[in-house]
Image (cartoon, helix red, strand yellow):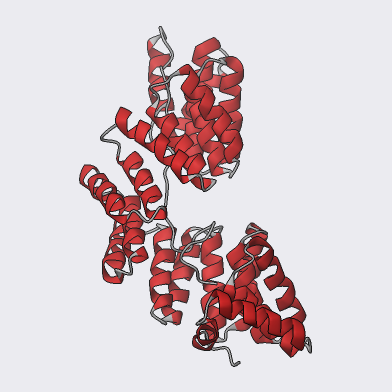
Amino acid sequence: MNDAKTTMPLLALLVVALLGWGVAPAGAAEPADQSATACKNDNPAVAIPACSKMIEAGQLKGNDLAWTYNSRGIGYDQQGDHARALADYSKAIEIDPAYGWAYNNRGAALNDAGRHDEAIVDLDKALKLDPNNGAAYDNRGLSHYAKGELDLALQDYNRAQALNPDDANVLSHRGNTYVDKQLYDRALVDFNRAIKLKPDFAEAYNNRGVAYQRQNKTTLAMADYDRAIKLDPKYAQAYVNRAVVFSDGKQYARAVAENTQALRYDPRHVGAWNSRCWNRAILGQLAPALEDCNQALKLAPAYLEALDSRGFVNLKLGNYAAAIVDYSATLKLEPNKASAQFGRGMARVKSGDAEGGGADLIAARKADPTIAQKFIEWRYKL
């Protein structure tokens, strides 16, 4: 289903982890200083080889070697290679168990891997080592946010913002939390300030767009998504969010095109696969829709919205047994989801189970009195 609020969102906010190096190798000779500068370069194509060269030379020990592994981990993180980043951060911690930034960075990488409880353990350690590490508060806020612990996330973002009042990332992250708490005025204050501090901050434009769209201010939302894409033409999430606008406006072909563009830049974007599946299903492009939903569920087997979408595809294909399986899996995750109740009810009725199907249809209409009309709008013939 093309839902505006999901665990792997279609209409989604975006977050950016805050990483750090700590102190560079001390007392190094001139060549090592130059290597250390390259190792800390913002371009991972420069940093990773420089750090690797320093490690392979075998001359660094203790804190200096830990710093170098941590720095290379940051380079891998910037490339999206989170497995290698985790390995390097862990090596840095093994060498120097009191290296707070390595704990912070490993916590951020664990967040990227969806391992939020483990991330919190590392970030707690980083903050024990340095209670004034604003980045660690911010990253722990991301952990709590991902777990749906919005009040805990907000507490951490407030601490991070107090320590780093002009950090645009922290403001954007706190704005996201306000959006999910439906405190839109506060969210807009944070997004506006983030954009003022960092005018080329594509993520803040995207996230402000979400705040506008949650308030049904579609024109303002689309303007922000457009701006985000202008600033970062490969920004997959902004294309997916723009697809939601088109889908909500019943411009399903344009939504498919937006999701196709998103997948060009991020082939593992689960929300884009699901959104394209949903919009193709409405258009009657059922075979490619099924392929899209299967891909979404291959990437994220417990993705509720993709299960619901595939149930709809199977319902329209007349694969009623498969539709019942998908809708039942959806309802296991969200028992009162009206689209899944109604879809399963229709599949059961058409399979000859009038009693079971009727019960589902009654429950669906109780959860959402407009659900039958929505299925008609989604071009399903009742």
Q: Residue at x 33, y 65 (%)?
A: 215
Residue 241 seen in the current view? yes
Q: Position of residue 162 (x, y in %)?
A: 30, 30
Q: Residue at x 55, y 20 (%)?
A: 55
Residue 198, compared with residue 334, is above or below; it is above
Asked whether, in this view, residue 162 is left or right of residue 71, the answer is: left
In the image shown, does 228 or 72 lie closer to the viewer? 228
Query: Quarter holding the N terminus?
Result: bottom right
In this view, the residue farthest toward the left is 196
Q: Position of residue 290 (x, y in %)?
A: 64, 75
Asked whether, in this view, residue 77 is left or right of residue 364, the answer is: left
Name the image quarter holding residue 221.
bottom left
Query: Quarter holding the C terminus?
Result: bottom right
Q: Position of residue 321 (x, y in %)?
A: 77, 79
Q: Position of residue 18 (x, y in %)?
A: 41, 35
Asked whether, in this view, residue 323 is left or right of residue 140, the answer is: right
In the image shown, does 241 or 1 lie closer to the viewer? 1
Q: Residue at x 34, y 48 (%)?
A: 175
Residue 290 seen in the current view? no
Residue 322, compared with residue 59, is above or below; it is below
Marker count (numbered): 0
In this view, the residue farthest toward the bottom is 381
